[in-house]
Amino acid sequence: MLSITLEPQYEEEWLGENPSRFTFPLDEGKRPLYHQWLTYNAESPLIINAYNTGTGKTKAAFLRLKKRVEERNYNLDSSEDNVLLIAPTNELLAQHARDAKDFCDQNGLPYRVLTMSRATLDEIKSRPGFSEGKLRNGAALHAIMEDPRRTDGDSRKKATIFVVNPDIFYYAFYFRYHKNDRIPLFQDIFTLCNYIIIDEFHYYNPKQLASFLFFMKLSKEKYFVDGSTKRQFCLLTATPSEKVDEYLRRLSLTAVPDIIDPRTVSPADTGQTHKVPALAPVYLEVYSIDELKGGDQGEVDGLISLANQKRDEITAWLRDGQNGAIISSSLWRIEQTYKCLRLQLSEYMGRITGPEQREGRDEATRRPLILATPTVDIGYNFDKGNNLRQNIDFLFFDARSSDEFIQRLGRAGRVLGKKQQNIPSRVYAVVDPEFYKGLQEFDGQVLSRILLRQLAETILPSRNDLYAYAESGSIAEAFLPIYQLRQMEATSEESEIRGLFESVRELFEGNSTIKFEWLRDQIRDFLDQDKYYSTFATFSTEKLDTLERVIVRREQHPAKWLEGFAFRLKKEQERRRKDGDSWTKREEAYEWVLKDMRAYFIERARFSFREYFQPPLALISDPKGLHTSNPISFDDALRIVRYYDATYFNSCEEWEQKVQRVAPEKAKDAIIFCNLKDLRDPGAQLRIGLKLDAGEYMRAKWEETFAYQLTALYGLVVVALNDSHGLTSDVQNLFCESFIPALVVADKSRSAAEVWRIQKKAQYIPYKLCVTFGDDEAVDYWAVLGTMALQVHAEIPLRILKSDLNKALRGDDNPMII
């Protein structure tokens, strides 16, 4: 264990003109910070506020909005003077909506505030009189954005602040809603708002960042023609990266953006600011994960062991009226820690996790000890009412990336605006051995937070550092809206669309050789596939058998779902005839259909904002409160199988009968039904793998078709690598009727070494995959599934993938020694 004392940290408070006497009443001693004043006055089309976490960046963005309204003399146009505020989590969404409403009410800004998420959209749709019939989500979203007064009938509100999650933004901007809603929603998201706030810009992975960069690029092309615009982007980030800075420079949104960064901002003139405490001193103890072991076999469990060791001290602090938090990247560790502490501390504890429902989260905020997953990493305020000192007196956390370490450390000791500003906080951090080793020379010393941050950024990896995809796949992704724009703007010249494509290519990778014509044909084909395949979330083996018989044996079948395949086959046949390359066997036509479907599901994963590979839901009865504070909850079915000992039921009806509870409406989305008995002990969790029957394929042909390239696997079966107890047939067959996008590499190949090297740069789990071939040979592979497969594939040098594939085709099975 290492002990380090962190110095207090100060911010510059602005002493000049007060931008809002309501937000900063001087008679209460409140003043804006210097960075808030700079943001208030920022006039560039691009504002980047990179001040530290907990210093009021969101309020700074609202102050800029106030200035924009003042410059318009409060005469707002509801067709363009709206605000789009994008926040990465629904927890933060709700918090920002509350803060935006309070700010507008305080300052008399004529804005209504609307939170747009799936849950709020469903609630608005269900209101009496909202619509005459049942509306699609996309149609309802368009109706709200087109006329927000439908939600409150308040004609005094001249414009709207739309607080949205990034998924809604992405699917509207990338034309991914229902075909009848795509164009209206694109126009809504692109034209209705001229002030766009993107909060926690550092949180997004490179693939997600690319969508925002493209949005800004298209804004420049469409709105900045004369060098000026009403549209402003305000990016808020506590941990900016050099790579993102490079993209923003390439974007050239403005010659001189307003970059408000504590590392580079020019100091104010003498007498205009003075220093105020922002972060109290911190007594920091750092533990290497290797020194914290638990379980019968001495397994590493890190934070669980540390919290258990400190249980008596935590109890004493809580009884003394102090507030604390325990934060982990792993929900399982939070669940185990809760179980470990609940006998002694149940009355003090609350949980803020993904599965926890709104009522449970609200209740947790009122408890003195909060156990949380990364839900609270991003901008979340541990609000403790009128607490005179910092809201978090002690904090335990683990972190594997620099982003996590910096964000979580920044939760402790926040004293900005507090009356008591010199009471130290205690922080206990569990880190990997390499970072621990890098801190050893500072044991017993006093450090600045700036130096500690620099050490974290130097030694620890970023949360997601896979930028190769942004320089290849993002161009293909951005081409979808470019193509749709070409279809929408019938009067536009081809040269204009090509010019937009070239500017996007230069933004992501100036040296890319990807061609406009090739992407046009790819997108055209994907949209055609989407017409026929988009309804197939799963595809039963019975349907595959039917499809094979219809194509190969030419059997007649009345099923409507076959029509789409007939259209695709007919088009392909016509293309082949023109090229003089018709099928010689009907089996070849069937293989083409399967290949076509695999290609479609790969591209479908590309056009997904979050991870496409989402395991099905489990409906959970939880009488002991092991998982959440509610006796009924939902979670990823694989998680439950891995980490819980449970009783499983065959149907929702049997679940209701046996657990004596009524299933909620959301239960229709669940395919696993269970009653939790206990958490599996550390070391006793199921290790999940996959197996695949390759049918008549021999190894060389299978690898040529599926390995070392992007593919989509059908027929995957879930297996336990240690103990199959609790692995029911329903769980084993969770994915067997789905086409799962994947990158598959042989165990001990050079490509496998790359998969594990890259895994240190991003948080993903390669699955062990055993494939059995037509001659009964069984071979082990590693599989990366879902959207992450596209990102990992882009990172592996093509020469390595080709080399491994060529070795496989030569039948060279000699393993590489790693």
Image (spheres, rainbow, N blue to C red):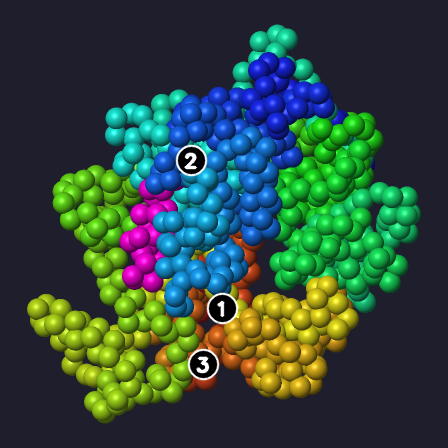
Q: Secondary structure at mark 1?
A: strand
Q: Is residue 290 visible?
A: no
- Check contact, mark 2 vs mark 1: CB within 8 A: no
Question: Of residues 596 and 281, which is closer to you in this image?
Answer: 281
The residue indicated by pointer 2 is 195
Mark 1, Cα crowd under 10 Å, few <14 / some 14-19 / many 20+, is: many
Q: Amino acid at mark 3?
A: Asp
- Label 3 – label 1 distance at C-alpha: 13 Å
* x and y percentages locating residue 455 in the rendered image: 64, 33
Sequence-first disc among 2 and 1: 2
Question: Of residues 548 and 78, which is closer to you in this image?
Answer: 78
What is the quadrant of residue 591 in the picture?
A: bottom left
Question: Of residues 753 and 134, which is closer to you in this image?
Answer: 134
Q: In this picture, which residue range is highlighted in magenta?
A: 171-195
* x and y percentages locating residue 163 in the rendered image: 49, 46
The residue indicated by pointer 3 is 693
Residue at screen point 40% across, 84% down: 541
* Left or right of residue 542: residue 358: right
What is the quadrant of residue 434 in the picture?
A: top right
Q: Amino acid at mark 2?
A: Tyr
Q: Is residue 745 magenta?
A: no
* Left or right of residue 356: residue 526: left
Which quadrant holds the N terminus?
top right
The residue indicated by pointer 1 is 781
* x and y percentages locating residue 703 in the rendered image: 38, 70
Q: Amino acid at mark 1?
A: Tyr
- Rendered view: 48 above or below 543: above
Residue at screen point 64% across, 82% down: 655
Question: Of residues 662 and 488, which is closer to you in this image?
Answer: 662
Mark 3, Cα crowd under 10 Å, few <14 / some 14-19 / many 20+, is: some
Q: How many marks?
A: 3
- Check contact, mark 2 vs mark 3: CB within 8 A: no
